[in-house]
Amino acid sequence: MRGYSPAPPSVSVTEWRLVKCLKLSNGGLSDRATSCVDFSGLSALDVLDLRGNKFSRLPSGIGFLPKLRTLDVGECEYLVSIPDLPSSLEFLFANDCKSLKRVRMSIDQGEKLHIFLPGSYSLEEIQGIEGLSNYLWYIGVHNHDSHSPNKLPPNKLQKSVVEVLFLSISLAQ
């Protein structure tokens, strides 16, 4: 029969809890869709790919995922803040999030968190950065087209990072 597609296989709630990698990239997820989703039950989730969606806030429960190591929200143009990252997180990809203003990380992140934010020019604050070890920090804020006559204004984050670095060095002495 033309146009017929079999029903997807049923998946039990127990099987969903065992999912380790979930890719929902470029799916057009909006705030309306994400307000109905709670990821906290996916206790085995290791990688969550939400790249290229249209929400302004993350779905609930992401901060409670005990095994989440990689979160990719790159190219989510309307995303304004990333609150409550789980302490297990090792990689946050939030590149080209043009509306992103705030990222909040747990004070338990330690040295293992790598944050990638190129192209997120509205970023003003990374809460919890002062709790990270200053063993190795790489923070880059740059304009991809340095020859453009429409230079980007100085990023507010630069001042915050310099203040945190100065505070960390002062406290270490």
Image: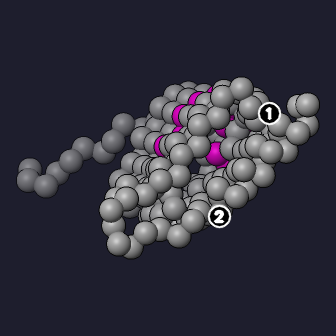
The secondary element bearing badge 1 is classed as: loop
Task: Give yes or no for residue 62 being in the magenta stretch.
Answer: yes
Q: Position of residue 47 (x, y in %)?
A: 51, 33
* Quadrant position of residue 9: top left
Q: Residue at x 68, y 44 (%)?
A: 85
36 w.r.t. 134: above or below: below
Task: Find disc 1 in the rendering and name its residue.
Answer: 108
User: Coloring scheme of the render?
Assistant: one colour
On whether residue 23 falls in the magenta region, the answer is no
Question: Image check: 125 left or right of 37?
Answer: right
Query: Image height check: is 17 above or below 121?
Result: above
Q: What amino acid does circle 1 point to?
A: Asp
Q: Say which residue appears at 76% left-offset and 30% top-offset.
A: 133
Q: Along the line of sight, which residue is nearer the eye, 86 or 90?
A: 90
Crowd around label 1: few <14 · some 14–19 · many ≥20 (10 Å)? some
Tag 2: amino acid: Lys
Q: Position of residue 165 (x, y in %)?
A: 76, 43
Give the numbered dot on residue 43.
none
Q: Which residue corresponds to mark 2?
A: 156
Name the quadrant containing residue 29: bottom left
Q: Do the residues bearing badges 1 and 2 touch, measured as CB atoms within 8 Å?
A: no
Q: Is residue 21 above or below residue 119?
A: above
**Residue 76 appears in the picture as rendered:** no
**Which residues are the magenta region?**
61-72
Query: What is the distance, in whole Å, between disc 1 and disc 2 at their CAs?
Result: 25 Å
Give the quarter of the figure containing the C terminus. top right
Query: Seen in the image, is 99 located left or right of residue 4?
Result: right
Indicate which label's residue lies in the foreground, 1 or 2. 2
Q: Say which element carries label 2.
A: helix
Furthest toward the left, the residue is 2
